[in-house]
Amino acid sequence: MPLIIFRYLSRQTLQVMLAVTFVVLLIIMSGRFVNYLAQAATGTLKAEFLFAIMGYRIPEFLVMIVPLGLFLGIILAYGRLYVDNEMTVLSACGLSDKQLLLMTMIPAAGVTLLVALLSLSLAPMGIREVEHIFAQQRALTEFDTLVAGRFQKFGGQRVTYTESLSDNKQQMNQVFIANHNANSSSVGTMTLMLARGARLEASTVEGGQRYLVLSEGYRHDLTPGALPVRSTEFVNYGLRMEERQAGQEISKEKALPTSTLLTATTAGARAELQWRISLPLLVPVVVLLALPLSRVSPRQGRYLKLLPGILLYLLYLSLLLSGRGAMEDGRLPASIGLWPIHGLFLLIALVLNLMAPARLWLMRRRADNA
């Protein structure tokens, strides 16, 4: 009988948890994907990197979503059992609150291990890969990210347009380039170049330095709103393409391996380490919070305590994020860290779990005294 009940309760909880996790993950990834897609459309992000970035960021998203999914899964699944009087029947058959807590903690332990794996290993690994991709993106020239038929701004000073672009991105047709020379004077001058075509060439004497060679065009140097305009016709005109090497060293604490954080002494590294440890610790605490919040009467409905539960979870997470920021800024000592926040919500969970037995004990005492 207990094994059947355990399998039934675990299945109900995990099904709702997976559904909530999938929906929230889909919403977050959709928002991120639209943002990256807009960057790819404007040429600030290479389209080939788009799906790789989204794939590597999934563990980072999941480590925040899975605890919320389990929390809501318990509230919604057990809330339905209370509304349908199934919990009343199970209690009449001898299922105590301690047994219910034990049966809930067993699948929660598996979720805790999953969150620990994501938080301590997979999420930092994914962030490192994303940082490498963005480093490669920063090393690209404007020619590598150019999109035909769009005016694209590069470096804050240059706007480039091409009517068409070859598949290998080595040849441009009908090119327009506007360069704002802000340092030339207090007003600033502009250089406009129009060319029938352009091609990318590498210099053999400068270590492979690349040049954009414009062909059959004009260069106009002018000051906006003033005369004269100096015009120059050219057959070939070379523009040096600025190239930056992709940095391989990742300095962001979020991307550092956990083994590196264990030996680091900086405030940011200690804050990141405690944050990664806090996420697995979050799971058993929210399970203890979810159990009393799932207790509802059939007249109240299963969603009665859903909003208070979500607000309590968001308060828990917000305090952890605030504590992490305070540790990074040096306003909170690492010796104190995030542990008092976990202790506070563990105390709240214990009080909520003891309220029902305490109320029942008081009712019995009043009945005996009567």
Image (spheres, rainbow, N blue to C red):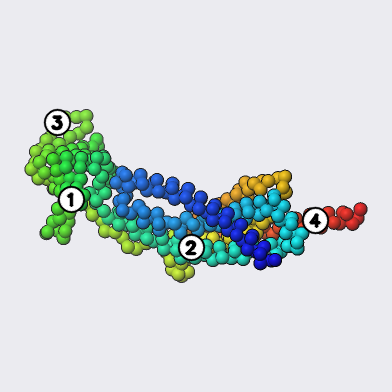
Please identify the quadrant where the N terminus is shown: bottom right
Residue 121 position, x and y percent, is 46, 65
Whether residue 53 sits left or right of residue 222 in the image: it is: right
Residues at circles 2 and 1 in contact by the CB criterion of under 8 Å: no
The residue at which mark 4 appears reads as 360
Residue 228 is marked as 3
Instruction: Pick whichever of labels 2 and 1 is earlier in the sequence.
Output: 2
Q: Name the residue under label 1.
A: 170
Q: Do the residues labelled 3 and 4 touch (CB within 8 Å)?
A: no
First along the sequence among labels 3 and 4: 3
Q: Image quadrant of residue 86?
A: bottom right
Residue type marked 3 = Pro
**CA neighbours of label 2 inside 10 A, class few (<14), some (14 to 19), many (20+):** many
Query: Of tags 2 and 3, which is closer to the observer?
Result: 2
Mark 3 and mark 1: Cα distance apart in space:
35 Å
Q: What element carries label 2?
A: helix
Name which of mark 4 and mark 1 comes first in the sequence: 1
Across and down, in percent, residue 253 comes to: 43, 61
Q: How crowded is mark 4: few (under 14 residues within 10 Å), some or many (20 or more)?
A: few
Mark 4 and mark 2: Cα distance apart in space: 41 Å
Q: Mark 2 points at which residue?
A: 118
